[in-house]
Image: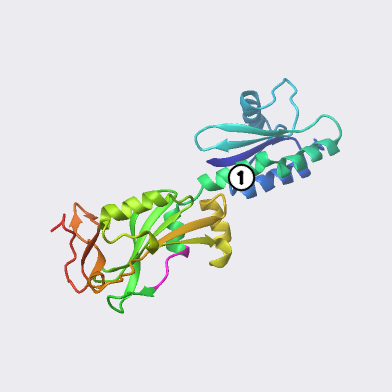
Amino acid sequence: MINQVSIVLANYCPHCVPFSLSNAEKIAKDFEVPLRVLNIEISEQEIVADKLVKEYGDWSEDYLIPQVFVEYANGQVIHLLTGFSEAVSVTKTSWEALFSSSYYKNLLREHRFMNHKSLKDFVNKYLNFKGKCRRHCNKLTTLDELRYNANNMVGAYVCPDGYVSKVIYFSIDPDINWFKNFLITQVGKEIFNDRDLRLATRYGWELESDASTAIRKISPTGMIKEVYWTTYPKTDEEKKLGVFLCSNLQKGKVCRKLFIQEINSTNRLCQECK
């Protein structure tokens, strides 16, 4: 991910100050990273500037300024812009073209996508709601994480007795077949039915005030998909059963496997952990 923007400039250069410096500040603000100003009129900064331009920019003994770079945490450096030697208006036009280009927009989108905390953090802050246990009791439920990585999370709303009201698959780009297989592996084919899946799209504007900004760090599209799974029993036999979450603790980790048992059971362990 990008961790710094650098601009090589000189105060005497009309192409540099004020508008190129101001535009470099805008880039740093867009990417939410520091701006490093390398003034070639200051000897210590000139040494650093020369090295940066020579390795990654448009180098000559008397090189053009300003030159702007974005620098990544892994050491990668991308040269973004060099000022023109023609009229100042030409350099201004170059800046305008940069900000309106698909290249800049894609670079910013990629950075925001890579710079997210995690989907899990976003879900826990903005998509974690209070509720009551359904069909089993009236106790409050909590969202328990079952599986997660940077772009996906599966969670279950669980009451204190381990009964699962619903399972939710949060994803930037959901793989419905993967989720189906996950559920079938956990609870078996007998209780799973496609009709019990529900799909929803979540946007930042429908959540808390700062969610619109936060969601852009999670998803390039500015949205998150939710796939809900809740069992809807039809027969009397189906109504006797419920989905539960195993709470067995082994080697410091909770099992968190879903399993099926009678809805009024006090057992908290899946078959493998018994």
Write down the region rendered in magenta.
Answer: 126-130
Q: Is residue 148 visible?
A: no
* Residue positioned 74% across, 25% down in the render: 63
Quadrant in which the C terminus appears = bottom left
Spot the residue most to the right: 87
Amino acid type, mark 1: Leu
* Closer to the camera in the image, 172 or 243: 243
- Quarter occupied by residue 48: top right
What is the x, y in percent for residue 98?
Answer: 72, 40
Spot the residue most to the bottom: 138
* Residue positioned 37% across, 53% down in the render: 179
* Residue positioned 55% across, 61% down in the render: 203
* Closer to the camera in the image, 100 or 226: 226
Q: Main secondary structure of the magenta part?
A: loop
* Closer to the camera in the image, 182 or 127: 182
Q: How many marks?
A: 1
Secondary-structure class at tag 1: helix
* Closer to the camera in the image, 73 or 150: 150
The residue wearing badge 1 is: 108
What is the x, y in percent for residue 204?
Answer: 56, 61
